[in-house]
Amino acid sequence: MTQNLTDPKAQPKKHRDNLLDDATKELNEWTGDDTAVEIHLFRMFSEVFKRHDKDEADALFIVGTKTTTPSLSAVSSAPVKPWLFSRVLALLGLSFGLLTLLFLVFHSDKAVPGMVFIGSLAVPFSLAIMFFEINVYQNISVFQATQVFLIGGIASLIATMILYQIIPSGNGVDLWSAIAIGFIEETAKLLIIGYFINSFRLNYIFNGLLIGACVGAGFAVFETSGYTGEFGLVTLFVRSWQAIGTHTIWSAIIGAAIVLAKEGRQPVQGKTMVRPKFLRFYVLAVLLHAAWDWEIPIPIVSDFDLQKWLIIIVGWVAIFVLIDAGLREVRTLQGQHIIN
């Protein structure tokens, strides 16, 4: 009797693994490598579930000054394991919960502005902190990141409004309107991200991820606050959790793509934006944004938010590939440094 070596239960998992490997391999080719990227969620976020004291948090927040920026040889190329962002998210989540309790139990309208502010801030700001931790070069200070978050977020909204005056966008429901909106908003953020990368003279992929994330997080906070004021608190509850895979992530992708394309210590220029290393990731961010706004005329997709979850997954796969490229860049630079 022959033994059946094929396990039917293993086939779906094998298919999913192959699909993920193919996707990460394709994205990684955009960064200049040709291998699939292994994604280890539990390893990356393993420090979230461990106890950390105040001194460890303080050490993370004092980086980026002349005395606290490590030399290239001291930069770690080990897999990144951010954790502080989870404490920030928990703090903001608790604050939002208490404000919601104040509103629902005591019917205090004075709690509403706080709910709007904290609810809009919680996820995007926590993600920005995560990218701050991931920046292994530790060459950007908390003050600089906050500056990009606030000024960059507002400036990108202003740039968006200017582009909306120039480019017709429609209602955002049909496919072409969604693409126009994605192009306008991602291009507006791109202009501000490029400005800060030049202004701070940043040259590393992790720097681009952080600057992009801060601009996108600021954009998300102010946009969600505006929509909540216009459409009510239900909008806040929906957009607050959806922020895990929208503007912050898309802008981080664009920031990393700018650094990938600008080649070393060269400033961001017009020719940077026409290089394939930039264009591929930029188009990906625009298409993710467009797909988010497009109302696909398929009831089962909209009823279960399948469209949104797929976009979130694709965005994060791109982020993990860019993190891997960032670590590879560290090892390459350190190797060149030793040779020199």
Image: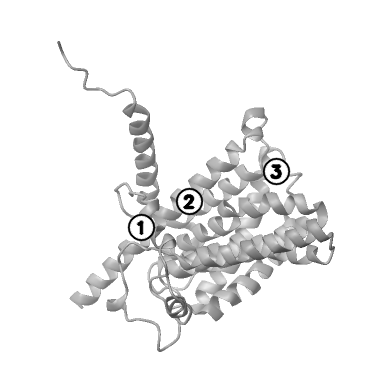
Pointers 1 and 2 in contact (CB under 8 A)? no
| Of callouts 3 and 2, the N-terminal one | 3
Left or right relative to 286: residue 98: right
From this viewpoint, is residue 161 visible?
Answer: no
Query: Distance from label 3 to label 1 (Cα)?
Result: 34 Å
With respect to residue 15, does 279 lie above or below? Answer: below
Left or right relative to 181: residue 208: left
* The one of 280 and 304 positioned closer to us in this rendering: 304
| Of callouts 1 and 2, the N-terminal one | 2
* SS state under label 2: helix
| Of callouts 3 and 1, the N-terminal one | 3
Report how many numbered discs are placed on residues in the image: 3
Pointers 3 and 1 in contact (CB under 8 A)? no
Residue type at tag 3: Ser
Residue furthest to the bottom: 67
Instruction: Specify the quadrant of the image occupied by residue 109.
Output: bottom right
User: What residue does disc 1 label?
Assistant: 324
User: What residue does disc 3 label?
Assistant: 177
The residue positioned 47% from the left and 80% from the top of the image is: 58
Residue 22 spot, x, y in % from top left: 36, 40
* SS state under label 1: helix
Residue 88 spot, x, y in % from top left: 55, 67
Residue type at tag 1: Asp
Residue type at tag 2: Trp
Q: Quadrant of the C terminus?
A: bottom left
Residue 333 spot, x, y in % from top left: 29, 70
Disc 3 crowd rating (10 Å Cα; few below 14, some 14-19, many 20+) is some
Instruction: Specify the quadrant of the image occupied by residue 103.
Output: bottom right
User: What residue does disc 2 label?
Assistant: 316
Residue 124 spot, x, y in % from top left: 59, 61
Q: Using the image, tell me which numbered label, if any, was put on residue 143.
A: none
The residue positioned 31% from the left and 53% from the top of the image is: 33
